[in-house]
Structure formats: structure tokens, C-alpha cells
Amino acid sequence: MKSKFTYTFFLLFLTSISFYAQTVACNGTLPFEEKDGILTIEMESGILPTGSNWEIGSEPDPNLEGATINYIFWNGAESFSRLSGSPITYNIKINNPGTYRLAWRGRIGKGTSGGEHNDAWLRIEADDFYATKQSSATATPALEPKPNCTNNPDRDCPEGSSTNGYFKAFMNRHPVNLPVESRWGFVTNTNDGNSFRFIWATFNTPGNYAIIVDARSNSFFMDKMVLRRSNVSDSVAQNLNNTESSCFDASLSTENLNINEVAIYPNPTSGKIQITNLPLNTKLTIRNILGAKVREINVKSASESIDISDLNEGVYFLSNNDQNNGFVKKIIKI
């Protein structure tokens, strides 16, 4: 009973406060902020893992006069049956909950086949992550990545590769037979042999989430990716004149009680989190989704680094015991 009460209190607390967005220059760790149902991210804006075979290239944009495409690509061994272990995490901030379609703009950068050098691993940390064959977010049949699909009677598992909650996400615009201006495009399919062209993520509440890309094919060029809410058209969201979304710095925000907002980054994380703008001499508590306490930390400074690599994957809540400057923050452990 106590755990349920605590968890309910957390949710009520989270929904009772509001923040004014503070946008700043993006640095690869700050979340890109969704606005009016659209989120646009240049792929090279992510932090490429140190020592990995991710590279950045550029070329003239055949679809936008005078513009240059900056793109990322994997220049290492291909990893078709498992993750490469070199993920790029793009932190995002959703302001308008709902179901969003993801599509990235890319082209096949090597060879003479439309079915090679054309994919990457994709995972979205959200409340739901799935794909449909039709353009409706509620269409059936629907696919879910392995292994979750094996336990969901309403979802099918993808034909071909899928692992650890990732889809194999591919395109098939021919690198030779098509005119140059048609080789780049917003094409993001999954499911071998019977493409499901629409990949969706549902965000039930405003907050921080993540898009994670891992290497699969060598020389698949990825320019940008777009998330658009189901009430926004592809033509509006995928307009090449759209600028990249701004980033959000919670440390510059104030909530309606006019106190400094506590910032946590990176979030999601697989290891350490850095917490800034803490009230002095406070006790931090981390609880799991059921409200059970998993850790307590006494801090005396305004900044603290905490290693949560030993925690299981999932959602946690960080809170403090300060009556005047209390807060509750969601942490996603990946």
C-alpha cells in the first residue's frame, strides 16, 4: 500500500508543475525539444562514440539549391545479427504527448544494389514503439521489436533481424538507377520482404525520452531524422527548409514557484548521471516504477554525479527531502 501511495504521489507531483523552456545551443547531450508536434534532428548533431567507426561526410544537396548535406555513416565491419556496440543516443524532450512517426533522410552510399548498405539499428525509448504497414498509427497488423513482440498477442514480430528492442530500419532507393535528385529521401522501413513503412513512438506524458541509433550496414548515409505527431503531415514535417530543433537546458528553467530547475543529464543513460542545481545539504532518493526505494544519497553541494550502471533497465524517479525546494525527476536507465 505504501509503495502504491508513493508512486501515485510522484505522478501527481510531476503533473502539477510546469516549466518555461530555455533553448540553447545543442551539445549532443541536451535534449532536442519538440515544438508544435515536430522534432527535426541533424544526425551529425549526436555524439559519435569515441574510437568507433562512425564518420561524418558531406556533399551538395541535390534537392535544395546551394545547400550542403552533412551526414553520418558507419565505416566499420557490418553487424547484421547483433548490435555493434557503438550506439548514438539523441536525447529528446516531448512537450505535446501523443503518437509520432519517425522517418530519417538517407541514401545508399556504396555499391550498385538497392538492398545493401541501406540500414541501421533503431530504438526509441518511449511508452510504445512499433511499426505499421499503413499510414495510420492505429492500423493493423502492427510489428514490435524482439523480444517484446513474443509476449504481445496484438503485435507480430518482424521478419528478419530485430534484437534488444531495436528495429532493423532500412531504405531501398536505388543508388545507381535513380536520378541523383531521387537517391536521398525520407524512407524508413522495417520487416524484410514485406515492408512496414511507418515506424511510430507513443509518448504518454511530456518529458525526456531518447532515440538510439546503432550501426548495422557499412556506408549507409544518414542526413537527418524527423519525428512528427500523428496530426502533422509528412509534407510539413519533412520540408527540407525546416531548421533543426532547438535544445532544452533544464538548468536555465524556472518552474511556477520560481526556483531553479534541477537538471539531469544524460537522460536516458546506461551509466552515470550528472545532477545540477541541487538544493544544498539534501538527501536524494531513487525509487523504481513501483515506488520501492533503491538508493539514497546524501549530498552537500549543488552538483552530484551518480553511477546507476548497476540498476536494471527501466524508469526510475529521483526525489529529494527539501520541503521548500522539493522535486521529482524521471530517469530512464537503458
Image (cartoon, grey):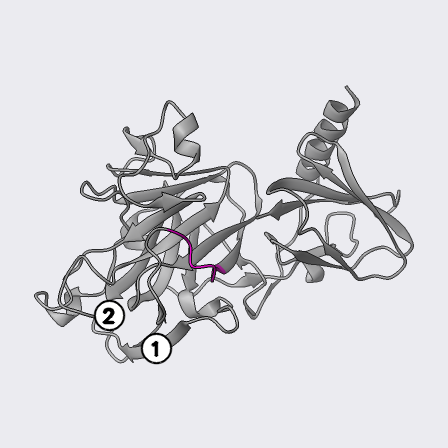
The residue that mark 1 highlights is: 57
The reply to whether callout 1 and callout 2 are in contact (CB within 8 Å) is yes
The answer to whether 73 appears left or right of 182 in the picture is: right
| Mark 1, other Cα within 10 Å: few <14 / some 14–19 / many ≥20 | few
Q: How many numbered marks are there?
A: 2
Mark before the other along the chain sequence, 1 or 2 = 1
SS under mark 2: loop
Residue 37 visible in image: no
The amino acid type, in three-letter code, at marker 2 is Gly
Identify which residue is drawn at 40% across, 74% down. 55
Residue 306 location (% of width, % of height): 75, 56
Identify which residue is drawn at 39% across, 39% down. 145
The residue that mark 2 highlights is: 109
Residue 260 location (% of width, % of height): 77, 57
The answer to whether 179 appears left or right of 152 in the picture is: left
Quarter of the view holding residue 293: top right
Q: Is residue 64 above or below residue 161?
A: below
Instruction: Give, as a single range, the part of the protein colored magenta.
Output: 82-88
Dominant SS of magenta comes to loop
Q: Nearer the viewer, residue 52 or 319?
A: 52
Measure how far apart labels 1 and 2 are at the Cα level: 11 Å
